[in-house]
Amino acid sequence: MKFDILGVGNALVDETFYVEKSFVDSTDLFFNQFKSISYQDQEDILSGLPSDIAPDVVCGGSTTNSLAATSNFGSKCAHICQLANDERGKFYEDNLKENGISSINGFYHDEVRTGRCLVFITPSSERTMGTYLGASEKLVFNPDFIEAANSSKIIFSEGYQFTSDENFSAFVKILKGTEQATKFALSLSDPGVVQTFKDRFKEVFEVRKVDYLFCNKEEATSLVGDNFVRDLSSIAVNFVVTNGAESSYVVENGSYAEIKAKKVQAIDSNGAGDIFAGAALNKIIEENSFLNACEFGNYASSKIVQEKSPRLSIDQYKMLKADY
């Protein structure tokens, strides 16, 4: 196999701000959720920020964050994402290379900007996002994507990929062309996304069953209701449902287990689910059981919530795995 993990996801430059809840309430964003907005809407929101608040800028997107983790943990990764022909696009592609992630797509949009996500973190570590998807929601399909998928052990994507007509169409084409030998992993991403685009999730599940599903309790209940431990089994062979500071629910080939959350002082929940998935995928590639893989994901997510960033440095990823 050419790659361990092939990601298909949104390419977003994250600008993270630490603010009071009152600021988020003054906007039209959905508190502690994702909302798709225009670039001008973002500029209007930023104009209301206190002048002493500056952003932490990192290359984000849920799938990208997961790939950064699993790549730096030792897996060979590639990414299918859509960038624009601008400075943010160049910044993003350079960051992929720095983290050992191969960029598969060589097409760049000229008529739209590279995507940008404004992330607002409140003192209680809630995460509210106002996202201009830009080029990231205009993925242009290329048959080479299917070749890359069939040269990978796992194809991995995110629920956010289903919010765009172009991206969803391209992803379904990729998935339909992917051979069963390549496993399918999916992160549900956001309860609002699941609720709004439930028909698209169902369409994907009709193409094939998910081998490794990652979600939190709110996303799981949005998809299948309160009895998610039973009902997710019809969708996924293996799945994990995280629950914040409470235990996670894990089902592996029909066997149920729980993983206790590690008690830490969380300051920023942004990226916790992403590093969980990335860490677990790395252990799956190393032929650990799904339960053991999720235990590593649980450990990794307990570390990221103590950081003011959805990503660690390359050295921090390597130290985290060495210390595990």
Image (cartoon, rainbow, N blue to C red):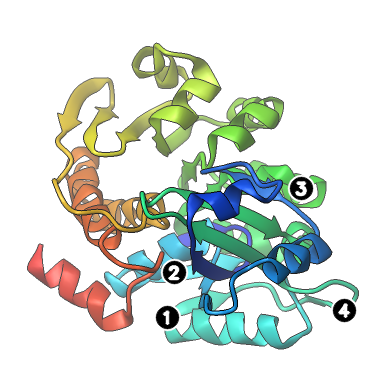
Q: Is residue 305 visible?
A: yes
The residue under label 3 is 164
Q: Earlier in the sequence, mark 2 or mark 3?
A: 2
- Residue annotated with mark 4: 110
Q: Nearer the viewer, mark 4 or mark 1?
A: 4
Q: Residues within 10 Å of mark 4 (few under 14, many from 20)?
A: few
Q: Residues within 10 Å of mark 3 (few under 14, many from 20)?
A: some
Where is 265 relative to 67, above or below? above
Which of disc 4 and disc 2 is earlier in sequence?
2
Quadrant of the snapshot with the C terminus: bottom left
Q: Residue at x 14, y 36 (%)?
A: 260
The vertical placement of 112 against 251, above or below, is below
Return the disc, 3 or 1, that comes first in the chain's sequence.
1
Instruction: Kindly identify which residue carries mark 1.
Output: 100
**Mark in the foreground, 3 or 1:** 3
The answer to which of marks 3 and 4 sits earlier in the sequence is 4
Q: Secondary structure at mark 2?
A: strand
Q: Nearer the viewer, residue 109 or 266?
A: 266
**Residue 311 location in percent, x, y?**
38, 69
For this view, does 230 lie left or right of residue 225? left
Disc 1 marks which amino acid?
Answer: Gly
Residue displayed at 38% across by 55% down: 123
